[in-house]
Amino acid sequence: MKVCTDSCIFGAWSAKHLNGIEKVLDIGSGTGLLALMLAQKSQCEIDTIELDPESAGQAQENIKASPWSERIHLIEGDILQYPLTSDYDFIISNPPFFESDLRSPQEKKNKAKHNQSLTLGQLMIVIRRHLTSVGTFCILLPWHRTGYFEKLATENGFFLWEKLIVRQTATHQPFRSICLFSFKNPEKAVVSELIIKNENGQYTTECAELMSDYYL
């Protein structure tokens, strides 16, 4: 799978929420991007799990080539069946979140992008099972499914702490949201917005600053 701008934004934004975090679970390794971004900005131990063998192999290559390979542990398997032996105080996932959108002729992309292999409801069950009582989880969502997932999270005992609304430009409608949830109830959820590019097609100052530790 190709590395997308929204995934990079997700990783950079999530990495800012690792203060005091020791154990991380990344659900859906892909290329290993998120695990690597979090490892770069922390001293966390990171377990990352990937269903697709070829993607897992690519992720393993990327992890081994990084300076953080000793802290990132790749698991090849199905998160719905794999017997994880620990709980985590931070869980991150860029899940296969399209439900009724047009499918690709490539089955690998369908499994990665559509919820035929992991529904949001199933993902919620996994998170509830493996998140510590004081932990937080972070998820990347398409904008049109954000309301549904917030309701799902509420029904499962979670509270929204922060939400980043992502737009391609100031004139575009939101296309992604990044949400941070916890079992604890905040006084007020923090909602902010990030615009990726300005009217000249250049990265905005806010986006460039967010990505500055990762982009050369």
Image (cartoon, grey):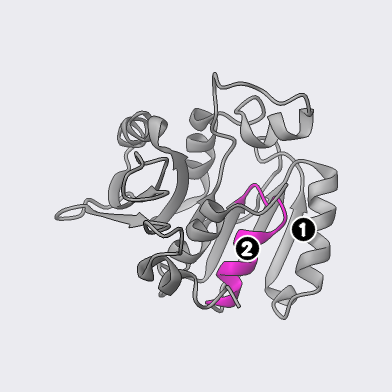
Left or right, 40 with respect to 18, comes to right
Quick check: can you spot residue 161?
yes
Q: Nearer the viewer, residue 6 or 123?
A: 6
| Magenta part of the chain | 27-41
Does the CB distance between marks 1 and 2 fall below 8 Å?
Answer: yes
Q: Residue at x 78, y 66 (%)?
A: 62
Does the stretch in magenta take in 31? Answer: yes
Closer to the N terminus: mark 1 or mark 2? Answer: 2
Residue holding disc 2: 35
Q: Quadrant of residue 60?
A: bottom right
Amino acid beneath label 1: Ala
**At numbered mark 2, what does the secondary structure look like: helix, strand or loop?**
helix
Q: Residue at x 64, y 67 (%)?
A: 36
Left or right, 89 with respect to 95, comes to left
Q: Quadrant of residue 99?
A: top right
Q: Quarter holding the C terminus? A: bottom right
Q: Nearer the viewer, residue 97 or 209?
A: 209
Q: Residues within 10 Å of mark 1 (few under 14, many from 20)?
A: many
In the depicted structure, whether residue 200 falls above or below residue 50 = below
Q: CA gap, disc 1 to disc 2?
A: 9 Å
Q: Which mark is residue 104?
A: none
Q: Residue at x 49, y 76 (%)?
A: 212
Q: Position of residue 64 (x, y in %)?
A: 81, 71
Q: Which mark is residue 59?
A: 1
Q: Position of residue 205 (x, y in %)?
A: 37, 71
Q: Position of residue 72 (x, y in %)?
A: 69, 68
